[in-house]
Image: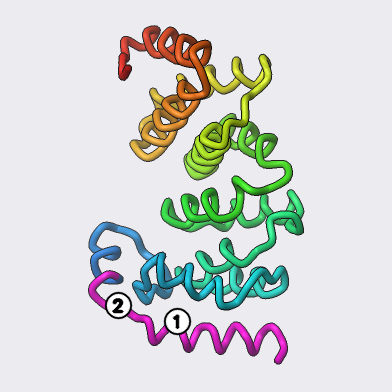
Amino acid sequence: MDTKERVKEIKQSLRQLMDGQTAQSMRDKGVDYKLNWGASIPMLREKAEEIGKDYDLAIELWKADVRECKILATMVMPAEQILPEVVDIWMEQTPSQEIAEQAAFNLYQHLPYAPEKAYQWIASDKDMEQLCGFHVLSRLFMNKQEPNERGINEFIDQALAALQCPAPSVRKAAMQSIIRFSELGLMYERLAKSALKSLNLDIF
């Protein structure tokens, strides 16, 4: 079966997982996709495990303007195979906060070049890229990946700027990443506290 046929078959099986109430609830919250069957993330994760990692399939699934296909694409794409320029295209085509968060969690945090991409994104003037960048850094910090001195300074500068951003989702992602950063050790906690104090913020 060729890749396009497989995508067609996957779409049919996803349609059977349809949850109209969930899809309607998303629409009510302003999350609008061309097609949204309201399938839950655990259901999609199960489907992804059944499929296994598959580069060509992930590329075709991403092209489909369907919420479930895009999320599934981030789950079945092998992180070691996707090139930085393809990641850039996916980022440009990310239609919603949900897809950005799923991509960061399922795929981008596992990229061999994840830190470089994350720092590039948090320095962007686009909300979606910043959101993704801070989510990826949160995951890297949770996995005890410590930044170098330049990375620390850049992270703190961009996080402080993001905390003053008008988009609540970016502010929340930046704050979450500062908390994860502070959990790397005492030095990091002190740096985070000192940085937040400059904005009259204290969360510790």
Q: Secondary structure at mark 1?
A: helix
Query: Image quadrant for the C terminus?
Result: top left
Relative to 46, say whether 112 is above or below.
above
Image point (48%, 67%), residue name? 45
- Residue 121 among those drawn in magenta: no
Identify the magenta region: 1-22
Q: Tell me if 137 is positioned left or right of 56 in this view.
A: left
Which is more toward the observer, 107 or 22?
A: 107
Q: For the residues labelled 1 and 2, say whether their Cβ atoms are less than 8 Å apart.
A: no
Residue that carries the numbered disc 2 in the rendered image: 19
Give the quarter of the image for residue 196.
top left
x, y percentage for residue 106? 55, 55
Q: Tell me if 152 is positioned left or right of 42 in this view.
A: right
The amino acid at mark 2 is Asp
Q: Tell me if 25 is positioned left or right of 173 in this view.
A: left
Image point (31%, 19%), residue name? 203
Q: Secondary structure at mark 2?
A: loop
Which is more toward the observer, 58 or 145?
A: 145
- Residue 18 among those drawn in magenta: yes
Give the quarter of the image for residue 86.
bottom right
x, y percentage for residue 198? 39, 7
Q: CA distance from mark 1 to mark 2?
A: 10 Å
**What label does residue 148 carry, if any?**
none
x, y percentage for residue 62? 59, 68
Residue that carries the numbered disc 1 in the rendered image: 14
